[in-house]
Amino acid sequence: MATRRQVLGSRMRAQQLDRESGIVADTAVLDIGVQDSGTDGALWALTNRGVAVTEAVEEQLATVWTARGAPHVYRLAELPSVAAAVAPFSEADAGKRIYDAAKPLKAAGIPVLSAMDTVASALRSLVVEPTAKGTVSGGLNALLDAPYQRDCRSCKATHIYEMPFRLAALHAGLQLRPGTSPPVLERIPGFEQAPHPDERHDVIRAYLRLLGPATPKDVASYLDAPVREIKDRWPADAVEVVVDGVTTWSLGPLSDDPPPVTRLLGPFDLFLQAKDRWLVMPDQARAKALWPVLGRPGAVLHHGEIVGTWRPRKSAKTLTLQVEPWARLTAELTEAITEQAERLAAHRGTRFAGLELKT
C-alpha cells in the first residue's frame, strides 16, 4: 500500500526536482528524454533540476523526435542506444504509433516496419547538410509512392504522413538543430544505431523509475504503443503497489512525503507527463485547466502539490509572470514563487518585472 503523497514525493526525488545542482551525466530525466516543446522546454526543465545551462552543457545534448513524435532532448553521446530504445517493438506497435498513416500502407501490402525503413533511408539520402523540414518533406514526396502520402486539405497539397517522417528521423541518424523553427534537420556525427539499448534507456523501466508506480496502460499511453506489447515486456522485478485502491507496479521502494521545494514547471515537464493524471491532479476542473487541448500553462509545484498555473508575459526585456493560484497565497508561497520567477527571467535573459495574480 502507498499513499498519493508518497507517490508524488518519490517522483519528485526520482526526477531530481529537489536538487540544487547537477550535471548532464547524472541528470536522470535525460534517460527517458526531456520534451522540448515551447519556450520553457527542455533547458528550463534541466535548470529546474539543478543543471547550470551553459554553451558547454548544450554541446553535450541533442534534440530528436521520439515519444509521440515530440522533440526530446537526450545526451548526444547516447543517441545510438536511445534509437534502439524508442524503436517500435513489433509490426503492431509500429502501426499504432504512426496512427492513420498505417492504413494506406497496409492496403498496399507494405509492412509498416519496412515502410519505416524506407522512409529512414530516404531521409538519410536527402539530409546531407542541414536542411529545413519543409525542404526535406518536399524531397520525400518526390521519392516515395502514394501509400506514404496524404492529401492535406488545409494547404491543398500532398504531403508525406507526419508520424512516419518524425519517427524515422532518428533511425536515419538525424537530429534537430537547436533553436530552429521551423526545425532544421542535420546528421548526427558518427551515428550508428545500437543493436540493443542500455538498460537506463529501456523506456518501460525508465517510465517506472521516473513516473512510477504505474500500470502497463500508463506506459502504453506514454509511448502510443499497444498495451499488450508493454505487458509482454513488463519487468520481472517490478513490485506490485496499491495506490488509492489501484494496483500499480514499482521498481523500488517509495520515499516519504514530497520535499519542501517550489518549482515553476514548464507545460511539458516530465512531472506533468504522467498518464495517471487522476493522481497528479484529482480535481477534474483544475485538471482541465492544467491540460487543455491547446495552449497549456505551466504548473506551480509547491511541496508536492500543483497549487496553480502560470503563464509568462514578456515585454521588451522584462518578464511578468501571470499566476492563477489554487491555494491560499501565504507570504511563504508568494516569496517562493517570486524567487522561481526571478530564476526563470534570468534563464530567459530578461529582468523579472513582478507577479500578476489572476483570480
Image (cartoon, rainbow, N blue to C red):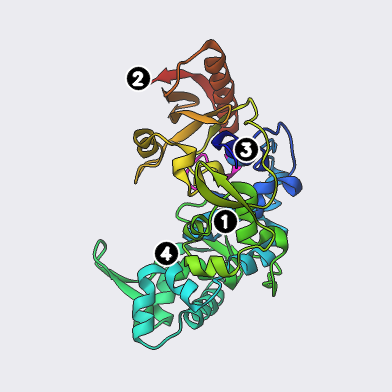
* Lateral position of residue 139 relative to residue 3, left or right: left
353 or 278: which is nearer to us?
A: 278
Instruction: Of the two numbered discs 1 and 4 on the same chain, state the one appearing first in sequence.
Output: 4
On residue 177, the disc is 1
Which residue, given by chain and number where applicable, does mark 4 sit on?
134
Describe residue 69's horizontal placement relative to residue 201 as left or right.
left
Q: Mark 3 points at which residue?
A: 12
Q: SS at mark 2?
A: loop
Tell which of 229 and 129 is nearer to you. 229
Residue under the point 70% across and 34% down: 19
- Give the amino acid at mark 3: Met
Residue where numbered disc 2 is placed: 359
Tell me residue 151's x, y (percent).
28, 71
Dot 2 or dot 4: first in sequence order is: 4
**Amino acid, disc 2:** Thr
Image quadrant holding the N terminus, namely top right
